[in-house]
Amino acid sequence: MAGYDREDLLRAASAGIRAPSLHNTQPWLFRLREGTIEILADPSRRLAVADRAGWAVRLACGAATHNARLALATAGRPAEVTLRPDRTQPDLMARLTPALSRRPTYAESDLYAAIPRRHSHRAPFWPDPVPAETRRRLLDAARAENAWLDLLVGMVPLAGFAEIAQSADRVLRRDARYQLEMAGWTHADTALDGIPVAAGAPTPEPQDLLPQRSFTERHRSPGRDYEPEPLVAVLGSAGDGPADQLQAGQALQRVLLTATDSGLAASMISQPIEVPAAREQLRRSLSRSGFPQLALRVGYGHPTPSTPRRPVTDVLIT
C-alpha cells in the first residue's frame, strides 16, 4: 500500500497540534520518514521543574498521536501505531504506518469533528449533572485505548480526592522555582503558546473544593462559585513506563473528545500526579494496582476562551 505523503503529514499535524499539554507548552514535532509519519517530543519545550521525568511530554504526545490517528482515518488513510518504535531515539514517541484503506467509522468522524472544539474549561460549571449514559461513554472511551477511568461519585470519595489535590497544590505553591516556571508560561499578550490570562481560572478562594492554577489575578463575579459536587474522573494505566504514559495520552484525548462530542467541557487537575507522595496516596485511595496519570473535572459550562496554537509549520521537521 502507498506510504503517507506530505498532504497526509499536514493533515495529521494540523490535528495533532490541537492536543492538550501542561501549561500549553505544545511539546511535539512531526516528520515524514520513508512513507510513515513520526511524532517526536520537542526537548526544548519540556518543563525543567514541573516535568523532570518527561511524564507530561509523553502524555501530550500521546494525545497528539490520537488526534493524528483520527485525522488520517477520516481521510480514508488509517494508521497502525507503534509507540516508541526505536529505543535508540528517546525523543521518537510514535510512528504511524499506513494500514488498509477504508471508510471512517461514525465514531471516528464524530471525534475528529470535536477536535477544534475541545479546550480546557477552567471556569465554574453549571450545576446540571452528567447523565449516566454519558458517563458510560467516558468510561468506554478510556477502555477502548487500554486505560481505565474512575468516576468519583459521592462526597466521600470526592472529599478524599480534594484533600489529596489541595495538599499537592500547597506543595507546589511553596516551590519558588515551580511557580517561576509556571509564570513564564502565562501570557497577557497574543503569544502562540502558554496560557493566556483570559483563559485562566478566576483567583482561588477559600471555599473552593478543588485547586486551581493561579494564571490570573481576576476575581470571579458574585455568585459564581465552583460547583459544590463536581464530577471528577481519574485516568490511569496498568503500567507506568514511557509507552504506558503515551498510551494514557491517547486515552486522555479520546475521553476529552468524547466529552466534547457529548456537549461537556473539562479541565485537567495534574497536581496530585506531579507530587509523587500525593500520586501514591491517590492510587491507594482508588484501590487500584495501576497508576493514575491525570485527573479531570467534567461538566457543562458557558464557552470560554481557548489557548492558542503554534502554526503547523513550526512543528514540522523537514
Image (cartoon, grey):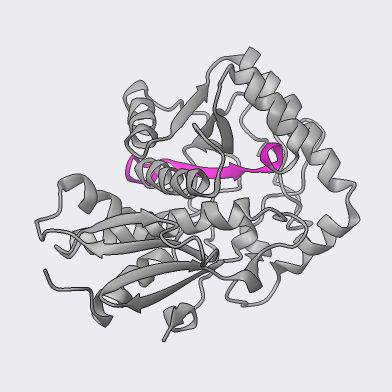
Instruction: Answer yes or no: is residue 246 visible.
Output: yes
Q: Which residue is drawn at the image coordinates 65% and 39% (left, top)? A: 224
Q: Is residue 268 magenta?
A: yes
Viewer-nearest residue: 257 or 219: 257
Quarter of the image that includes the N terminus = bottom left
Q: Where residue 58 sits in the image (x, y, percent)?
A: 54, 55
Q: Which of the pair 256/102 is nearer the observer?
A: 102
Region in magenta: 260-273
- The x, y position of residue 66, in whole percent, is 37, 54
Q: Residue furthest bottom?
A: 318
- Image coordinates of residue 290 in percent, x first then y, are 54, 28
| Tally of numbered tags | 0
Tell me where residue 8 sits by quadrant: bottom left
| Horizontal relation, residue 275 to residue 117: left or right | right
Estimate the x, y position of residue 18 in percent, counting from the top left.
Answer: 44, 63
Tell me if residue 120 is in the magenta stretch: no
Q: Residue at x 20, y 59 (%)?
A: 78
Quadrant (top left/top right/bottom left/bottom right) for the C terminus: bottom left
Is residue 126 visible from the viewing direction of this image?
A: no
Where 9 sits versus 153, above or below? Answer: below
Q: Residue furthest front?
A: 88
Instruction: Give the camera-side residue of 303 and 236.
Output: 236
